[in-house]
Image (cartoon, rainbow, N blue to C red):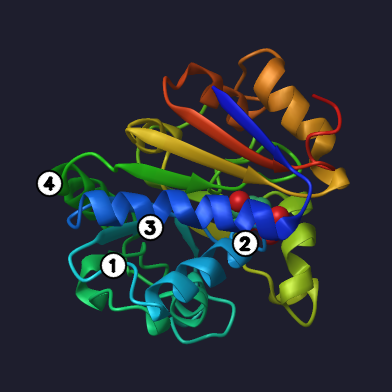
Amino acid sequence: MIIHKFESQQALNEVGAGMITALAQMNPHAIIGLATGGTPVGIYEEIVKSYQKGRVSFRNVTTFNLDEYVGLPEDHPESYHSYMRHHLFDHIDIQLNNTNIPNGNASDPSVECGQYDALMEKMGQVDLQILGIGHNGHIGFNEPASELRSGTHLVELKQETREANARFFDSIDQVPTHALTMGVGSILKAKSIMLVVRGADKAKIVKQALTGPITTDCPASLLQTHPHLIVLLDNEAGSEL
Ligand SMILES: N[C@@H]1[C@@H](O)[C@H](O)[C@@H](COP(=O)(O)O)O[C@@H]1O
């Protein structure tokens, strides 16, 4: 694995965005795995700036998002569908029909998950998967558990995850209790993975994930098995490494 630590958020954002724009420049038909949460926002901002300067096009790029809440209307401001449009899709030339996010309102979640996996399979390997990490080591919404699922599936969110994400909602009662998420198997199938982590509050889990035992109790620890893992940390998140 390659670990880069950054003094400033701006430097981290520019390097992260640079890897994604370079991929789209080298392969206009690239398949990119996208993440949500607070962590990638600054990277998406830098991608938009590059696009606005005419340096990169996403016209033929395909994207697959990691996850989506169950039961939030697609146009709810905190749905991951809204997040992606707000932070990225509405500001670049990507074709919306080339963007894929699990449908958290599907009448049959297991059918939806099966279709999502089938589409990923059909499109081919994700070239670069962007990832954040939860304080409990979750990736996507793969929560710590005695066993992990490989493909896309329905999960019940842990209370700590709902509490962490309550900052985006008016109250914790509004945070959905369930989500659809790519499985760890799908995530690990990507050719390269870019894990991004910021903040002192994540220093401990980063250390555990990258240097601790590989265990389903810390889903991010499975990233240690990936042959092309790039980790972008601010100094605070990397302080225990
Ligand atoms: N499902 C998302 C993850 O994809 C994200 O990486 C993580 C950390 O979020 P944040 O970046 O806001 O700390 O939790 C969320 O719940």
Between marks 2 and 1, how big is the CA–CA gap?
18 Å
**Residue under label 4:** 122
Query: Residue 181, can we see it?
Result: no
> What is the CA distance from the residue labelled 1 to the residue labelled 3?
16 Å
Residue 93 in view = yes
Q: Is residue 196 left or right of residue 208?
A: left
Q: Amino acid at mark 2?
A: Gly
Q: Quadrant of ligand 1?
A: bottom right
Q: Residues within 10 Å of mark 2 (few under 14, many from 20)?
A: some
Q: Give amino acid for label 4.
A: Lys
Q: Is residue 207 above or below residue 75?
A: above
- Which residue appears at 12% of the width and 46% of the height? 122
- Provide the residue designation for mark 3: 21
- Closer to the chain start, of discs 1 and 3, is 3
Q: Residues within 10 Å of mark 4 (few under 14, many from 20)?
A: few
Asked where in the image residue 126 lies, by quadrant, the reply is top left
Q: Amino acid at mark 1?
A: Thr
- Left or right of residue 204: residue 143: left
Q: Which mark is on residue 190?
A: none
Residue 31 locus on image (x, y percent): 26, 51
- Assign a secondary structure to mark 1: strand
Classify mark 1 as within 8 Å of ligand 1 or not, answering yes or no: no
Q: Determine which quarter of the picture holds residue 175.
A: bottom right
Do labels 2 and 1 touch, CB within 8 Å? no
Q: Are marks 4 and 1 in contact (CB under 8 Å)?
A: no
> From mark 4 to mark 3, how far is it between C-alphas?
24 Å
Whether the residue carrying mark 2 lies under 8 Å from ligand 1 is answered with yes
Res 99 label:
1
Q: Which residue is mark 2?
A: 37
